[in-house]
Image (cartoon, grey):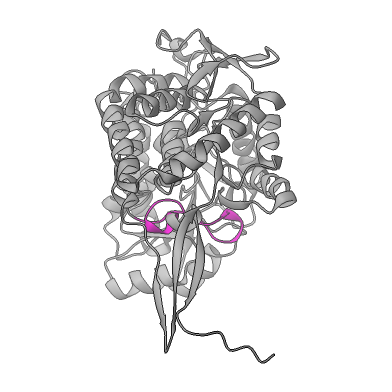
Amino acid sequence: MASTAAPAELQLYIDGAFRPAADGRTFVDTDPATGAPLSRVHAAGPDDVDAAVAAARRALPGWAATPAAERGRILQRAADLLRARNADIARLEVLDTGKPIAEAEAVDVLSGADCLSYFAGVAATLHGQHVDLPPTAFAYTRREPLGVCVGIGAWNYPIQIACWKAAPALACGNTMVFKPSELTPLTAATLAEVFTEAGLPPGVFNVVQGARATGEALARHPDVDKISITGSVPTGKAVMADAAGTLKHVTMELGGKSPLVVFADADLDNAASGALLANFYTQGEICSNGTRVFVQRAVFDAFVARLLPRVEAMRIGDPLDPETDVGSLISQAHRSTVESYIAAGRAAGATLLCGGDRPTDPALAGGAFLRPAIFADCTDDMPIVREEIFGPVMCLLPFDDEAEVVRRANATPFGLAAGLFTRDLARGHRVAAALQAGICWINTYNITPIEVPFGGVKQSGIGRENGLAAIEHYTQLKTVYVELGDVDAPY
């Protein structure tokens, strides 16, 4: 578990170049799989936030005036660079997050590149509308950039989230200041370097590192026009309150406690695969995870019989080993939180079918590893069923009929995602329509192509990322009314 790929020191990236924090403050970034320090990171204070926002503001007129096709070409060059450096960037992502290298190489960097490519193609297609107003007038709309946008990332998919926010913002002619999570600061700086190499002008994309205080300074900054955050519900509420001071545009992709419904007529092998993806990919640290697995009573035992052997066969180990299935949680503190939920589940009467403990391999002792856990005998009022754990904990819940499971699935303040497995085509669409979620999968789970919108309802978020829907959140419409005749005034 070497950590030689991380820079010894990571500075802020402002106006096209690295620079130290104005007050010299730093913090240590740690490899969650070993506990070893990775990099000393400069923490942005108020002066640094001001400098980053000012750089973005200076760069805005020139970037907004850049032909959209040229903006798209720069984004495409950046996408090509990410793909060419996939292996190196994925390794850096693994060191920062603890996730398996097999996942990072297949998904994290490449999905970010796909996002850049998609919005590179969208850039030149942005347009307004013409409205004819006979007999002597017409109007048209212009789709214009919002201005300086702030992106605040999460620690589970650092470079993917940075791309999800940067690509539509830059394609639409905005500039951006991006703050990654203080737990995973490395690859956002790499993305900034890639953008510069691809031809992005200085100041168009800036990176400031730091914790909550840095995010608050960005959210409250009077010269920021829009905030996009991926994070927890409490963090989203705090950012929204801070942004209200200047009525900034806000989009949020927050947490969830999503349902996955397995009907009796489902292909149970596929359903088990879906449940595994919905709970244990990236150690369960995915906001859309379907951690409430509702299984129709007639096939409950058969489903569990298919599920348990596959979970117990998952390999926990060094995240840099291509054979590893389960890596490290993000930190020792987060593992303790997940373990407290497992203890609470057992105390409430749920039956732990497997996992939930730390692996015994001494080579893993320095990391935040935890064996995937599955609970049966759960009830809807248990904390492990109601609250987002953000770790490898699956709750199995039997149900009898469609109306019951829809009611129970929707009985949550969250509404990010949902899924169902059935061979009944009519039921699939009927239940998908009834589930209160921003995205719903039928006969699969956690597949998020860049072409389709992603986001939540209720307390799981505001707005959408990806797809053409994202354009609505990074542009504003201006209406222009044109009179071709005389003006008839009554006075």
- Residue 82 position by quadrant: top left
Residue 182 position in % (x across, y down): 59, 26
Q: Seen from this angle, which residue lies furthest bottom?
A: 490
Quarter occupied by the C terminus: bottom right
Residue 313 can be seen, yes or no: no
Q: Is residue 444 above or below residue 198?
A: below
Task: State whether residue 97 is above or below residue 390.
Answer: above
Q: Which residue shows up at 49% across the image and 19% down it? A: 17
Of 238 and 364, which appears nearest the observer?
238
Nearer the observer, 211 or 395: 211
Q: Which residues are magenta?
A: 452-470
Residue 183 location, x and y as percent? 56, 25
Say which of 305 and 55 sits in front.
Answer: 55
Magenta stretch encompasses residue 464: yes
The answer to if 331 sits in the magenta stretch is: no
- In the image, farthest residue toward the right: 245
Give percent across and percent down for residue 144.
47, 55
Q: Measured from the top left, where is residue 389 in percent x and y?
A: 58, 41
Q: Quadrant of the N terminus?
A: top left
